[in-house]
Amino acid sequence: MNRIDSVSNEKIKYAVKIAASSSKRKEDKIFFLEGLRLCRDVALTGIKIKTAFFTDKAYEKNQSDADFIKDKAENSFLISQSVADKMSLTENSQGFYCLCEYSWVLSEKDIDAKGKYIALENVRDPANLGAICRTAEALGIKGAILSGCCDRFSPKSQRAAMGSLLRLAVVETENLPETLRRLGEKGMKLYATTPDENAAQITKSDMNGGVVCVIGNEANGVTDETFSVCKKLTIPMKGRAESLNASMAAAITMWEMMR
């Protein structure tokens, strides 16, 4: 492998820019991963790795994993610790970094009308987005439908998802109400969550067959336009809490969908 020791190297500057800029990621269709697990996971998925970087210590300590990742990458480099410090977004970096191509695109036509999907509307916290998709994969949800959400390819989203965003079927739509309306015409049940205690209780709702459940924005919930095409569901709560964190509400919702 070739070696990079300078933080001014163009490849390093490009990786740092991709990690930091959502617009650059979208423009170039490239995203940044950090950490042994995520880099190994992306190598296992078949997603194209454009460039892999390893510190000397990381390569020596995890040579079999590093070689596996290197074999899947178009280009690989050993890097100095100072370069790793420049690239790293975590306090205790493992010395593994990848630039990957997100050339796979799923659309509404890929949605299985008999499957169960979680839809996220205007979820802005990458930690919530990643955690929800991690839970979705763990519970066997067919996929996620995203509308107006934060960048799923951001390092924070990817880290919170722990690899699930590399494997879970994800569809993005600019008009969630219209997408849901068409899915409803295909026979899918459409639900949207709300803290309103007058809504139907999720524990008593029919989750058989194809289902889409919507989780809304952390502060404002589901939009009126989306509520207009969905049946409102609420998670029964006791105590004085007015609502649940978006990722917790999603976890309970998906558990009920799959129960």
Image: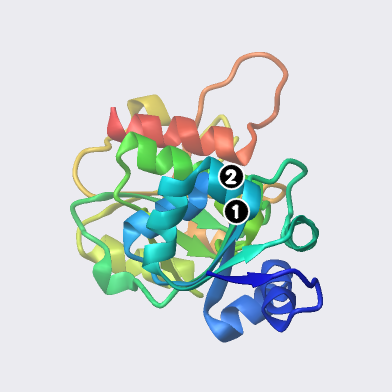
Viewer-proximal residue, 68 or 221?
A: 68
Q: How far from the left and from the top, in percent, is residue 155?
A: 63, 58
Viewer-proximal residue, 148 or 234?
A: 148
Q: Is residue 184 above or below residue 236?
A: below
Q: How far from the left and from the top, in percent, is residue 232?
A: 46, 44
Left or right of 183: which side holds 218?
right
Viewer-proximal residue, 88 or 146?
A: 88
Q: In the rendered image, is residue 46 in sight?
A: yes
From the image, tell me which residue sits under label 2.
160
Q: How far from the left and from the top, in percent, is residue 24?
A: 66, 80
Q: Residue at x 63, y 53 (%)?
A: 56
Q: Is residue 223 above or below residue 139?
A: below
Which disc is residue 141 wearing? none
Q: Secondary structure at mark 2?
A: helix
Q: Residue at x 27, y 63 (%)?
A: 111
From the image, tell me which residue sits under label 1.
157
Q: In the rendered image, is residue 42 in sight?
A: no
Q: Residues within 10 Å of mark 1 (few under 14, many from 20)?
A: many
Which scheme is used to colour this image of the protein? rainbow
Quadrant location of the C terminus?
Answer: top left
Q: How far from the left and from the top, in percent, is residue 234?
A: 50, 33
Q: Residue at x 42, y 56 (%)?
A: 67
How much space separates mark 2 and mark 1, taking CA atoms?
Answer: 5 Å
Q: Secondary structure at mark 1?
A: helix
Q: Residue at x 67, y 47 (%)?
A: 218
Residue type indicated by callout 1: Ser
Residue type indicated by callout 2: Ala
Q: Is residue 138 above or below residue 109?
A: above
Q: Badges 2 and 1: C-beta atoms under 8 Å apart?
A: yes
Q: Residues within 10 Å of mark 2 (few under 14, many from 20)?
A: some
Left or right of 156: which side holds 105?
left
